[in-house]
Image: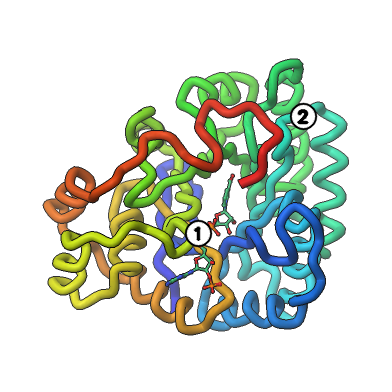
Amino acid sequence: MKIPTKKLKNGFELPVYGLGLWEVGGRLESDISKDSEEIKGIQANLDSGVTHIDTAELYGNGHAEELLGQAIRGFDREELFIASKVGHDGKLSYDRVRKSFEASLKRIGTDYLDLYYLHLYPKHGYSIEETMKAMNELKDQGLIKNIGLSNVTPNRFKEAQKYSDHKIVCNQVHYNLQYREVEDKKVLSFCQDNDVMLVAWRPLQKGLLPESDLILKIAKKYEKTPAQIALNWLISQDSVVTIVKTSNVDHLKENLGAVDWTMEKEDIARIRKEFPNQELVSEAIPLDYEGEIAP
Ligand SMILES: NC(=O)c1ccc[n+]([C@@H]2O[C@H](COP(=O)([O-])OP(=O)(O)OC[C@H]3O[C@@H](n4cnc5c(N)ncnc54)[C@H](OP(=O)(O)O)[C@@H]3O)[C@@H](O)[C@H]2O)c1
């Protein structure tokens, strides 16, 4: 299927749904035991029309990028939108960015990235000016098409933008029915007001979103599953797209049933207000976090 896209005024465009590769090829260490099944999982996504793939140097200590490289052989690179990230530890010197970038390219087996993120804002002792200099050089050299940030507050976003000649086009953050830090800390409204794409990570809370009568009722109304409601609630909002990890073809099919329709505004608002057990700080990576932990 053709996955719908969202386009910002600045021209940046992303499919509303993409594939995430956290826990593909290991967690913090490389795990090669499921390589062939994971390559097949990535290819099932590509065969179904998923073109946006999100990875990071962190994932499986680089092995997710290697598996991605193997999975995309035989696919047209220009049809794909590949995003990766540097600096999960926040140690973002100029040299680190340049070296990590080269290593990511090599592992993926490509000569450019469509989007390159700072995984976290540089931690204390590292200068955002220096980090953004490296990111801007990569963009000027045509090695990356777009610059993104991840897990940052509006103030940190503005600070990074101050040192970037190029528009920073997205902020990738923890956002789902339960985890609402980006609403509470005004990241969502900042993105919507400033022509920035919000890329929602962990949209299904790894399949562990709390059960809710409200979601069951709304699922019945739209003749959808709770997972489809969870995904559609995100992407029905302005400037929001999402990424999901799945290697399971049934889950993939279910998730793609969330992308080609729009929830009514009243239902979006009702779910925003009434969904139970909401949390205002990410349990994995709080927005003001400074380096060292993994998701
Ligand atoms: N920027 C950051 O700091 C950051 C942090 C965390 C994650 N991310 C990115 O965001 C992506 C998505 O987040 P995530 O992987 O943490 O969580 P997620 O996508 O919410 O959940 C993935 C888990 O849910 C399962 N799943 C997928 N579809 C399902 C469905 N329809 N029903 C039931 N279970 C389903 C998957 O298993 P199956 O494979 O069996 O389907 C997998 O175990 C990551 O892969 C990564 O690329 C970024």
Place of residue 22 in the rendered image (x, y in percent of width and height, measured from the top left): 63, 58
Identify the residue shown where x is 67% and y is 82%. 40
Secondary element type, mark 2: loop
Left or right of 48? Residue 139 is right
Determine which residue is flagged by label 2. Answer: 91
Point out residue 154 in the picture as x, y percentages from the top left corner.
Answer: 46, 26
Q: Are marks 1 and 2 in contact (CB under 8 Å)?
A: no
Q: Which residue occupies the foreground of this view, 150 or 195?
A: 150
Q: Which mark is residue 243?
A: 1
User: Tag 1, which secondary structure?
Assistant: strand
Question: Circle 2: is it few (<14), some (14-19), or many (20+) Cα within 10 Å?
Answer: many
Residue 168, compared with residue 70, is above or below; it is above
Ligand 1 is within 8 Å of the C-beta of the residue at disc 1: yes
Q: Nearer the viewer, residue 120 or 142?
A: 120
In this picture, residue 189 sits left or right of residue 78? left
Q: Earlier in the sequence, mark 1 or mark 2?
A: 2
Q: Is residue 166 left or right of residue 71?
A: left
Quadrant of the rendered image containing residue 29? bottom right
- Picture coordinates of residue 237 (x, y %)? 29, 50
How far across and how far down the image is residue 213, in percent? 17, 62
Q: Callout 1: few (<14), some (14-19), or many (20+) C-alpha neighbours within 10 Å?
A: many
Q: Residue at x 54, y 42 (%)?
A: 284
